[in-house]
Image (tube, rainbow, N blue to C red):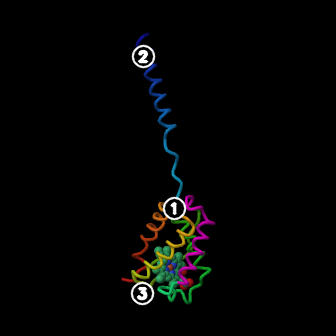
Amino acid sequence: MLKLDRTLSALSLVLLLSACASSYAPPPQKSLYERLGEKPAIEAVVNDFIGNVTADSRINGFFARANIPRLKTLLVEQICEATGGPCKYTGRNMKDAHAGMGIQDSHFNALVEDLSKSLDKFNVPAREKNELLTALASMKGDIVAH
Ligand code: HEM
């Protein structure tokens, strides 16, 4: 009888400890999409960013004949999807979209700087800013001319 008692109290201790451990588990991490402020925040940043790009004499020549409203829509879709949001990107892949433009490292860096300014303007925190810029930097190989 004493042995059974001991087994039962050991079992209750294990159950109690596992209940405590599960209640101290960290909450599930929100997606970057959610942390950025979802679609309205992404739209606001993209609007401001494209404003910076079209005013930036280092790169605005590339966009002289661009369809700006379409570009904004596609960029919002792309950022929404890439950050874990519910959108589906409907544009061309980055290689085809930028083929033959002769985009150099300096142009790519200028565009990232223009985006970075917009992220700062909307007070996007450093962690989210870095995550977004890292995701976009991974596309560089398909955008810059080799
Ligand atoms: C991570 C960086 C970049 C991203 C995420 C990006 C994204 C995009 C997207 C989504 C499109 C629309 C694709 C389509 O037409 O189906 C596009 C088009 C275009 N991009 Fe980029 N791009 C980047 C860098 C650049 C750079 C560095 C330049 C030049 C300095 C550039 C110039 C253009 C131009 C001129 C178009 C065509 C616009 C039009 O014909 O209406 N992009 N880009």
Q: Which numbered tag is attached to residue 125? A: 1
Circle nearer the N terminus (3, 2): 2
Disc 1 + disc 3, Cβ < 8 Å: no
Q: Amino acid at mark 1?
A: Pro
Q: Amino acid at mark 2?
A: Arg
Circle nearer the N terminus (2, 1): 2
C-alpha span from label 3 to label 2: 76 Å
Q: Is residue 146 visible?
A: yes
Q: Is residue 93 visible?
A: no
For the C terminus, give its image quadrant.
Answer: bottom left
In magenta, the rendered stretch is 32-55
State the image coordinates of residue 115 (x, y, percent, origin top left).
51, 73
- Taking depth in this image into account, of 128 and 77 the one nearest to the observer is 128
Q: Residue at x 49, y 33 (%)?
A: 20
Q: Which residue is mark 2?
A: 6
Q: Which numbered tag is attached to residue 102? A: 3
- SS of the residue under disc 2: helix
C-alpha span from label 1 to label 3: 33 Å
State the image coordinates of residue 6 (x, y, percent, origin top left).
42, 16
- SS of the residue under disc 1: loop
Q: Chief secondary structure of the magenta span? A: helix
- SS of the residue under disc 3: loop
Q: Residue at x 55, y 89 (%)?
A: 64
Circle nearer the N terminus (1, 3): 3
88 left or right, relative to 143: right
- Give the crowd class for mark 3: few <14, some 14-19, many >=20 residues within 10 Å: few
Disc 2 + disc 1, Cβ < 8 Å: no
State the image coordinates of residue 105 (x, y, percent, origin top left).
39, 80
